[in-house]
Amino acid sequence: MICVLGLTQINLTRLSKQQRHLIVVFFIFFLLITFSVINSENLDEAFRKLVLKLPILFFPLALFSFLKLQSATVQRLSFIVSYALFLPAVVSVYNYFINKELFDDLILQSKPLPIEMGYGIYHIQFSIILASVILFGIITLHLMFKNRQLGLLFYSLLILVVVNMICIHILSARTGLLALYIGIVLWLISQFRSIGKKQLRWLLPLMLIVPVVLFYSSSSLRNRMKNTIEDFNVVMTHKDANDYSFALRVRAWQNAIDVIKQHPVFGTGLGDAEQVLFNNFESVDASIAPHNRKNPHFQLMETAVQSGLICGLLYLMIFIVAWIRYEGAWNFKLIAFAMLYFVASCFESILERQASDVAFVFFIALGAAYTSIVSRTST
């Protein structure tokens, strides 16, 4: 109902074909999620999860709100969200350094670093949102530099982006880092045509040097990579996965695939998915300890388990629409944000926690609107 009311406030003729397609996909996606509430036996849990996913319903309003913004407002918005993430990131890094020996040992045991001032926000979830904010900041800085807007806001934002970039490496959540670099690389691809040979001479070495420097300057990141290698060895050799996060994810993926085969059309129901997944571990891999029998942390699979394969494919359609070439051009800003979240979706349940749910809608809507904002401001 809210979505329909929102759509009545939007002049659809003002939207591009890609923006209209995204609205339709988001709307149908939420409708199928709502239907899976009816398919649930545990209605209390189903309604709790539906409320958690409500931000999906507000995608049209988020998109239209961004389309109304001027470029200067978007720049200030980038500064605000960068600063909002800067505070918990810096405090968490400080907390890491004063407890460095303990936390380095936890990292080697596949344990997350605590996020301070994050109101209980989970480590990986925070890293995904921080990665989105960093990408937003980089894109904004580039546009400001291109337009020679090199004032106080530019340099303040630059400091925040640099500090946030350092923090995400020290906090060393692999999902956030991988998603960030995928997003940056895809956005940079769109810029190669407009970058001159002189700029490439310093830009390409910088792209190679910065990750290497950050890797060798962050012991937490090195420990996380060491842990990752051990994780892969456990997966390849089929050893006991109970103490390894990625190996546990692989077992959870196998478990989710088995459940999807059993409930392909309508899923298990939004409120019953976790219990069905937990119970199914007994037949798929009984060696996994009860406290490790968790959801797959792969949003496409998790959606298919809850609401059926069609709903899972609709979630995938969001990213496909972002990749489609409309009117002879790709929207690389949308592609960058969409691929950041697609990669994150492969290793985290981004729609099962409301903070990342809100961030997903926010940044996909921002990416879809960004080109319109820039073109309108430049005319």
Image (cartoon, helix red, strand yellow):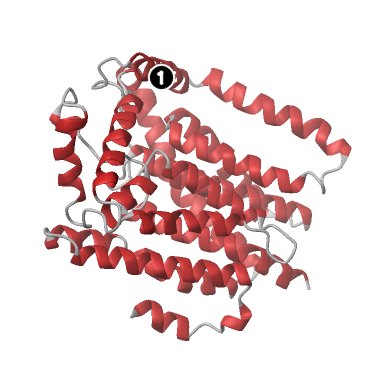
The amino acid marked with disc number 1 is Phe
Q: Residue at x 63, y 72 (%)?
A: 16
Residue 25 appearing in the image: yes
Residue 293 as seen in the image, left or right of residue 197: left
In the picture, residue 162 is in which quadrant? top right
Residue 26 as seen in the image, left or right of residue 10: left
Residue 100 as seen in the image, left or right of residue 270: right
State the image coordinates of residue 167 (x, y, percent, origin top left): 48, 34
In the picture, residue 57 is in which quadrant? bottom left
Q: Residue at x 65, y 51 (%)?
A: 139
Q: Toward the viewer: 199 or 187?
A: 187
Under tag 1, what secondary structure?
A: helix
State the image coordinates of residue 104 (x, y, percent, origin top left): 35, 19
In the picture, residue 359 is in which quadrant? bottom left
Q: Toward the viewer: 39 or 120?
A: 39
Which quarter shows the N terminus?
bottom left
Q: Residue at x 11, y 59 (%)?
A: 41
State the image coordinates of residue 117 (x, y, percent, origin top left): 33, 44
Which quarter shows the C terminus?
bottom right
Q: Which residue carries the number 1 mark?
A: 232
In the rendered image, the vertical position of residue 230 relative to residue 270, given as above or below: above
Number of residues whose C-alpha sits closer than 10 Å to that of mark 1, classed few (under 14), some (14–19) or many (20 or more): some
